[in-house]
Amino acid sequence: MPKKPTIDDARLILELYDLRREAEMRKARHWWVATFWPKCADDFVKVATAMGTEENNWLRQVGGYWGIAVSFVLNGVLSEKLFFQVSFCGEMYFIFAKVTPFLPELREKMKNPEMFLTIEKAIMGSKLARAQFEKVEARVAAMRQQK
């Protein structure tokens, strides 16, 4: 995965950032970060199978965004060093930490062994990302206890 950042990498990061500013995406991101706190796989499945609801749309929109964005890193299109900075993808770590405790069960219940797989591969395949994720994961676990 390691690749020296280029001007094109910087441009792509800015484009990805700009996409996050779209109005509906902002609502979706806010819902994921502030409102959606699944305690188990069933909480996630309930939203994931409620097709046509606003929450289902938001769940898929944000999950899809981060899956696509991280695929650029996995395929060598985008610098790992730039992408995995907390200032850019801290939200991805946060969202992934919310589902990590029950991810195997979630994949089984959704009959989708690839659910969150690109995000997982990217984080676990990068020393930088793993170190950042561990910090965020601990914070999310503490926050979950307060919910």
Image (spheres, rainbow, N blue to C red):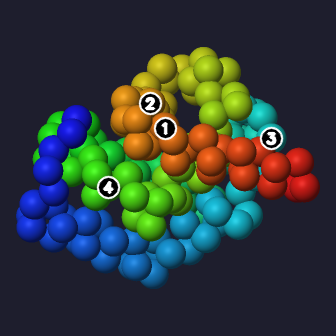
Q: Nearer the viewer, residue 50 or 116?
A: 116
- At mark 4, the secondary structure is helix
Q: Earlier in the sequence, mark 2 or mark 3?
A: 3
Q: Amino acid at mark 1?
A: Arg
Q: Amino acid at mark 2?
A: Met
Location of mark 1 (residue): 130
Q: Earlier in the sequence, mark 2 or mark 4?
A: 4
Spot occupied by residue 84 in the image (x, y as percentages of width and height): 38, 52
Structural distance between the alpha carbons of marks 3 and 1 = 23 Å
Q: Tell me if 90 is positioned left or right of 19 in this view.
A: right
Q: Tell which tag, 2 or 3, sits nearer the viewer.
A: 2
Spot occupied by residue 41 in the image (x, y as percentages of width and height): 72, 32
Q: Residue at the location (67% across, 21% down)?
A: 105
Look at the numbered discs 1 and 2 and tell me whether their residues touch, using CB distance below 8 Å: yes
Residue 70 visible in the shown view: yes
Which quadrant holds residue 43? top right
- At mark 1, the secondary structure is helix
Location of mark 4 (residue): 83
Location of mark 2 (residue): 124
Location of mark 3 (residue): 39
Q: Residue at the location (71% across, 45% down)?
A: 138
**Residue 93, numbered circle:** none
Structural distance between the alpha carbons of marks 1 and 2 = 6 Å
